[in-house]
Amino acid sequence: MTTRINKERLNKFISKSHSKWIEQADYYELNKEWLDKSALIAIKILSTLRNQSSSQKDLATSIGVSPQYINKVVKGYENLSLETICKIEKALGITLIEVPSYESSQVIHDSFAPITYAIPRYESKPIGSEKSDYKSHSNYNPEEEPIAA
């Protein structure tokens, strides 16, 4: 009797549909780079809204989108366009993404210029073409006494 009652209680918590956690995990692995950055942007937006005592609805109104869209943004689910990012930055007075400035063409041109090396050239003589500069005398004297160690 108690077993049947326990099974009934347990069945209340069991879902009738299959879990989609494998599909969700695959989706996250495929989109990890932008999802991670989106989460960091969401944290910065939420932190700024809290510091400014503002709401998601106020942000939505100021940039001309629905509050539901902002909710997706702050949950990190939305793949933001540059236009939307710029609107959010302007509305909140913050920087979400910083792009490095473009270097002048002269600097780029100089970085690809070939490096010139000054290699000294010595006159070489082909082997056997002339008398060599061999010195027949030697500083080695085999008749020296060995030193006892």
Image (spheres, grey):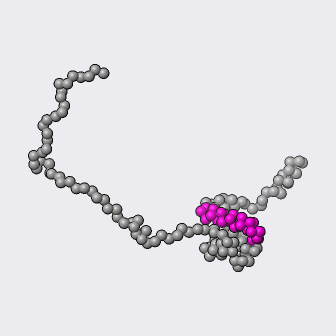
Name the spot of residue 133 as percent of width and height, x first. Answer: 13, 44
The C terminus, quarter of image: top left
In the image, is residue 89 part of the stretch drawn in magenta? no
Most common SS among magenta residues: helix
Name the spot of residue 125 as percent of width and height, x first. Answer: 15, 51
Residue placed at 85% from the left, 54% from the top? Answer: 8
Q: Is residue 148 left or right of residue 71?
A: left
Above or below, 94 relative to 15: below
Residue placed at 20% from the left, 24% from the top? Answer: 144
Above or below, 79 relative to 141: below
Q: Quadrant of residue 86?
A: bottom right
Q: Which residues are magenta?
A: 32-56
Residue placed at 43% from the left, 72% from the top? Answer: 105
The answer to whether any part of residue 46 appears in the image is no
Task: Decide which of 33, 101 is in the foreground and name it.
Answer: 101
Q: Is residue 13 left or right of residue 103?
A: right
* Residue that extends furthest to the right in the rendered view of this protein: 1
The answer to whether any part of residue 95 appears in the image is yes
Name the spot of residue 65 as percent of width and height, x first. Answer: 71, 77
Task: Decide which of 29, 86 is in the foreground and name it.
Answer: 86
In the image, is residue 35 part of the stretch drawn in magenta? yes
* Residue that extends furthest to the bottom in the rendered view of this protein: 64
Q: Quadrant of residue 47?
A: bottom right
Name the spot of residue 116 as percent of width and height, x first. Answer: 32, 62
Residue placed at 79% from the left, 57% from the top? Answer: 14
Number of marks drawn: 0
